[in-house]
Image: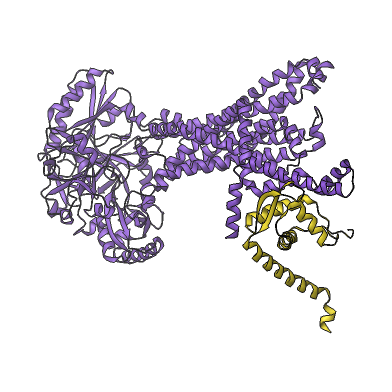
Chain colours: A purple, B yellow
Amino acid sequence: MRRLRVWFMRAAGSIHKESRDRDLGQEIESNLQLHIDDNLRAGMGAEEARRQALIKLGGIEATKEACRERRGIPLLETFAQDLRYALRMMVKSPGFTVVAVLSLALGICANTTIFSAINTLLFRRLPYPDSDRLVGIQNQSRKERGIQLVSTGDLVNWRKQNTVFDQIELINTFAAKNVLVGGGGSDRVGIQYVTPGLFRLLGVKPILGRLLLDEEGRPATVGSVVISHGYWLRRFGGDPHIIGKTFFMDIGTVTVVGVLSPGFDLFGTGDTDIYQPISAEGAAAYQLSDRWLLAVARLKPGVKLEQAQSSMDVVARRLEQAYPDSNKDLGIRVMPLRDALFGWTRQVLYPLFAAVAFVLLIACANIANLMLSRGSSRRKEVGIRSALGAGRFRLIRQMLTESVLLALLGGIVGLGLSLWGIKAFVTLAPQWYPQAREITMDGRVLAFTLAISILTGIIFGLAPALRASKIELTESLKEGGRSSSAGQRHRTRSIFVVVEVALALVLLVSAGLMMNTFLRVLRASPGFRADRVVTLEFRLTGAKYLDVSTIEKTGFDIVMPQVDIFCRQVLERIKALPGVEAAALIDWLPMSDDRTDGPSRGFTIAGRPVAQGGEKPTAFYSAISPDYFRVMQIPLLRGRSSVDEDTYATPWVVVINEAMAHKFWPNQDPIGQVITLDTVPDEERPRQIVGVVGNVKQFTSAMDPLPEFYASYLQQPKQSPSSFTETRLHKSLVVRTLFESKSLIDNVRNTVAEMDKDSPVFGISTVRDVVVHSTTGERFYTQLLGSFAIVALLLAAIGIYGVISYSVQERSHEIGVRMALGGQSRQVLQLMLKEGLILSGLGVAIGVAGSFAATPLIAAFLYGVKAYDLVTWSLVSVFLMGVTLLATYIPGRRATQVDPMVALRCE
Amino acid sequence: MGNKTDVWQGTLALMVLKTLETMGALHGYGIARRIEQTSGGRLSLNYGTVYPALLKLEQEGYIVSEWGLSENNRKAKYYRLTRAGRKQVEREAQDWEQTTAIVARFLSPAKELL
């Protein structure tokens, strides 16, 4: 209580300081008079009486100071004092302030931007109720540690056997493409397949209509779907009467039963229009190995993640024994839902975070240097302060106040800049980047920015403060004194420059490797010739192409003969257009985004034992029309290609790529070998390998080609498992033209579009554009790392420039003497260049060592260059040395222009 | 050290309080002089040191101050004890006696043992 009162009084004492000071002065003065009166009475002379009284009183100022300290809260008050002083200093040297604040702002802006991106995906709570109890469950191979998705069969088993989850639901991990027909048009849509309980699990509400019901997930029900808010606005203009309207999809008629509330987008890619229920019931054994979904679950209250994991470990062992065919060596991974959805982005974002941290550190080193050089001009000020009794701690505190204030200013400006930075990030981000539009600043970002601002203030302020406060009084107060600590200070500054150059080199090496990768990806041969090839996609839609009535009984859809007829007609009509050299079809054009079925098909090789589970051979599989290799100019290496004479009735054949030949027949001639696909066991026929073609890259030029095999579109089973149906109905048309012309492209488009109004035509482009589009990931990374590296380079150059010009200024006396004694200006320049060369050389050497540790971080994004690519490394090092030497040369030249008379006189 | 002793801070507060208890309201100079007198000239203090001590006691609420006139008609700031101050004198005096008694035992242990 008493203590509280004291602090209250002290706080009150901080205000009305002047009047209290005056009061104390009067009190001391009056008491002094009383004392003098007494002394006079004791018979002293007036002079002596006063002198004695003063001696007895002791130092008046010290007394007053002691009272002052007692009266207020000294820490707070001196802080206010420091702050005022710091502001005054900043205003006094606006040039320094602007440079420091701007370079800090750049660094902090980069950090805030990248942290905002990380925060959005990896730290922010998922926007679902009780989100800390939401987990993702996936399969994980015990051997390869690779994550595998989940089948409906898994779901049935898990629901039955687990004791730790309230609810488990499924959703596929990307929006599958399909077509919605009706309401005056046919429309390419993104579909997510969900078990009906998913919305309940995530607490998602409809804004119109209702959610899916559990019984709508059962096989025999009519198709009810819910649509996303965005699609409702875009396609139906927010029609309030949408509920109950029916449309046509492959599965038959679908009815819109609900519109979801805005903002629900589990994977954050913004491309889901329709949610269609899938069934987990009656999952047959084959569905156990059909793993294409993500399991989302809610932990029972009070159950920890680790408990759930160990409980599911037991379940996994049990399932392994019960279903050796499909579950051998298969573990179950339980992870926070956020990690399951976005954990993979760490690989992308953390290297960027490291890069921006480097930029900020370089900025810190720069400002520390600026402050050090200012420190020497403030030597006298510090000397006077410490002569008047300022303690070392007090001096350091005052200087740290200055630097933290500077950093906070930088932080504020940086925060403003990062509003723009985030916009740039969103613009640069490739299409697949999740939740790009959700990147915003929130409390955590602000706290982060505040924290790094204060931290940077301390980092760059500490060394100069320590150095400046360690002062020899007599030295510093001497007029024009050449301090012996100048050499030491210069050494500290040199160390900072070395650190800057080293950090900049690490960034430049990383950016250089990325740039190299990007250029190589652009130049890399995709395996086909992309010039003069026009492409478009169409998707056959309607009952005349697909019969879904048998799916319940057999598990397969039936692809109608009309598909083949349509394809043949398309080819005929396109080939008849003027300017067309050749035309062909393939399920999915390589490097296009939308391939939605599993990447590969399993098969067995005749004459080899049938492999189990994960060891089963798989490869990419594409149905093509015979001219495909000719249109794309993919070289036929051996044997023959598929030809017009290969039809459903003749023996089925396949053409494989080099990678497949190499993988499965390494020391053997694959021609004549026979394989059988697993997809439709009762209809599939053994296929003989008749040819080997060159490799084509399936995803981007940056990924090595995978094994792939091709068969004629005419040699396909009539039946199709529903997960492959989209592939059967979707075709990419490729047209090799004699010349590039807009009207030809329109002609091709119109020809196809006119053939069937219900089957949408889209994705009209040139194959070259598709290839370029596939490099957006590399471009994104190159642009970001590149811009960080440029900022780092600039800052480092400014840093070395500053040190050398300061060195020139400090040594102008020495230089003057040298010149006066007949020294050549060339020699003086050499002297300066040597200093710069030593600094940057040291920095580069350390930076090279640092790069060895850093570049493996981005190794996964590199293509065609090793992380330790000698050419990139040496080019970047030489470049950096060049820039630093230029930064040395400019102030170095100034040294040669020193007038010896002026230099000597200024002493 | 000579035969005049310096005053250390903790005891100064007690001396100030005790002085005010015996003398009633008094100004800073008077308090300092009185302390020296009471010590029989064995204590010597810079009169300046009483002011921070007085300020502390005032903040703690043991004393209050007001401006008044001295016996020879000079304006001076007078301090007097509050009720809390009187209690504090008692408490501190007791503590002090206890402490000195204990210390005394340590300084002449032989006698106690006999």
Residue at horizontal 79 percent and vertical 22 percent from the top: A813
Residue A605 appears anywhere in the view: no
Seen in the picture, residue A423 relative to A289 is either above or below; the reply is above
Q: Is residue A19 left or right of residue A152?
A: right
Nearer-the-camera pick, A267 or A817: A817
Where on the picture, by quarter, is residue A874? Answer: top right
Q: Is residue A259 left or right of residue A635?
A: left
Location of the C terminus of chain A by quadrant is: top right
On the image, the x and y values in percent for residue A751 come to 16, 24
Q: Is residue A337 left or right of residue A384?
A: left
On the image, the x and y values in percent for residue A637 come to 34, 34
Where on the picture, by quarter, is residue A284? Answer: bottom left
On the image, the x and y values in percent for residue A861 come to 45, 39
Nearer-the-camera pick, B101 or A755: B101
Location of the N terminus of chain A by quadrant is: bottom right
Nearer-the-camera pick, B42 or A252: B42
Where on the picture, by quarter, is residue B63? Answer: bottom right
On the image, the x and y values in percent for residue A259 come to 19, 44
